[in-house]
Each structure stands twice: as C-alpha cells, then as structure tokens.
Image: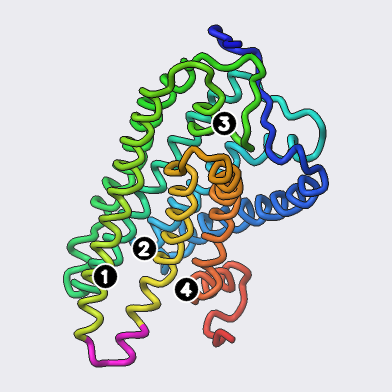
Amino acid sequence: MVNHSSPADFLLLGFSEHPGLERILFVLVLASYLMTLVGNTLIILLSVLEPRLHSPMYFFLSNLSFLDLCFTTSCVPQMLVNLWGPNKTISFLGCSVQLFIFLFLGTTECVLLTVMAFDRYVAVCQPLHYTTVIHPRLCRQLVAMAWVIGLVESVVQTPPTLRLPFCSHQQVDDFVCEVPALIQLSCGDTSYNEIQMAVTSVFTLVVPLSLILISYGAIARAVLRINSATAWRKALGTCSSHLTVVTLFYSSAMAVYLQSKNPYAQKRGKFFGLFYAVGTPSLNLLIYTLRNKEIKRAFRRLLGKDVDSRES
C-alpha cells in the first residue's frame, strides 16, 4: 500500500532487531557525542581567543569544528532516544528537517575539506606566497562558498525526496532520515530520485574528492623533490591530519550514497551511515588535536599554565 499524503510519522528501525546491540551503541554514541560537543567547542574557543591561532589553517579548522557540532546535533539526540527505548518514531516534519540539515551540512563538509586541501597545497608548494594567496578575505569567501553550495544541494534534493509516495508501513531502515533510506521506503517509481542522487553524489563527493587527490598529487611531487628530512617531516605534519580526515569522511559517505541495491550492501551501509554521522566528527577532533602542538599550547595558556613548558 502507498501513502500519497504526508505521513504522520516514520519509524527509524536502526538495529531494533538486536536490542542488546542497541544498548552498546547507545553508550558509544553518547560518549562520542559528548566528546564531539566538548572538544569542538574548545577548538572554536581557542581559535577565537588565542592570537597565535589566528591563521587560515585554524580558521578553516574552527569552521570544520562548528560544522561537526551542527552535523551531529541534527541527528544524534533523536538517535539516542531511539536506541534507548522502544519508541522509534520521528514526525514527518522532524524527518524533513533532519534530512534538509543532514544534506546541507554533509555537502558543506565535502566542499570545506576541498578548501582545506587547497590551503595545504599552497602551504607546501608555494610557501613563500602563502600569506599573499591565502589572505583573510579569500578564506571568508571560500568558507562562504562551501556553506552556499551545501544549502543549494539540500534545497535541490530534499523536496523531491519528501514528495515520494511512501509505503504505508512507514518504516525507515536506518538511524536517520537519509536520501537512500527514504528512496528505499517508497512504493512508487523512484527512477528520477535515484538518478538525481547519483548525479548530485558525483558533484558533491566524486568531484571534491578528485580535486583533493589532485592537490595531494601536486604536494607529493613537491615533497619528492625535497632532500631535507626536516622538510619532509614538516610537510607530512602539515598534511597528514587533513588527509586522514578526508579518508575517513569520504570512504563512509561514499559507502552510504553510492551503495548498490543488494540487501547486504544496504545493511553494511547502515553501519557506515552510523559512522558517517557519529564517528567521523569525533575522530576529526582527535586527529586534529592529539598531535597538534599549537592547540595543546593554546589550551595550556587558556588554563594559565607555563607557556614555555615543553610538550611531552
């Protein structure tokens, strides 16, 4: 049966067939969410309050932290409610808002990571011109471009998805309201939506990833021409964190949005979707802070400790 009107609510199934797994996931998701909230808020504060962090790299990083905060908050509270108890419903309006924000912020992060790759390319390949190329006005323009592209993508893709004729059971086989899960829920013709998702995935995932790989290809060629071990280590330190974040984010996002239709791939996509929504924001935080001496020094100064003490 097909419900041609807007349904009253949806059921987010998640892993409801495995209650024991849901309890474990509740603890893991809650811990990751709290770490994401505290850690990314701290990065934003340090980037604003610490003069030594007033550079393009940390401007982009603070925007990524703000993006991750919004990204996880758009879906994790509802996810925690669903994992904790038997009530797994979300209203049609709530699902619509979640879908819009999820697409908006996910696309914005794709573009922002590409912008950060360009920043790393200029830092390694054109270090003498870095301050003239990556100036504050350009940084603001690039970040604004990322947010605008994300907004346009969500405005384009959300309405056609919500206008699908959904099956009467209204059971979304996922943790959040995502395009692939809602297309799967439809009992009508989804050819247009599948084509639209494939095309937008190319523009929002494949094209940005290709630009990132081109940037790192140029960085690799520049590094291979360097004979100094110190310069090698500096270049590696400059790019390794961003490259790790790109690998985690794009691998999980492509597993969700470019998956095949077979049941095994869809079940695997559910795990990747959970990692995409919860795992990557918390891992971004760890990757960018654990080995970043500038952030650790800024944190020590914020606490009023000796700024000249050597890092252990």
Identify the mark nearer the N-term, 1 or 2: 2
Which residue type carries mark 4?
Glu
Return the residue nearer the eye: 159 or 262: 262
Count of numbered marks? 4
**Number of the front mark, 2 or 3:** 3
Which residue type carries mark 1?
Ala
**Number of the front mark, 4 or 3:** 3
Which residue type carries mark 3?
Cys
Q: Please give the label number shown on residue 57.
A: 2
Identify the mark nearer the N-term, 2 or 3: 2
CB atoms of marks 1 and 2 within 8 Å: yes
Q: Can you identify the residue that label 1 sits on?
A: 123
Residue 283 in view in this figure: yes
Q: Can you identify the residue that label 3 sits on?
A: 177
Name the residue rendered at 57%, 69% in the picture.
299
Figure colour scheme: rainbow
Identify the mark nearer the N-term, 4 or 3: 3
Q: Which residues are magenta?
A: 226-233
CB atoms of marks 3 and 1 within 8 Å: no
Quadrant position of the N terminus in the picture: top right
Left or right of residue 125: residue 31: right
| Label 3: which secondary element | loop
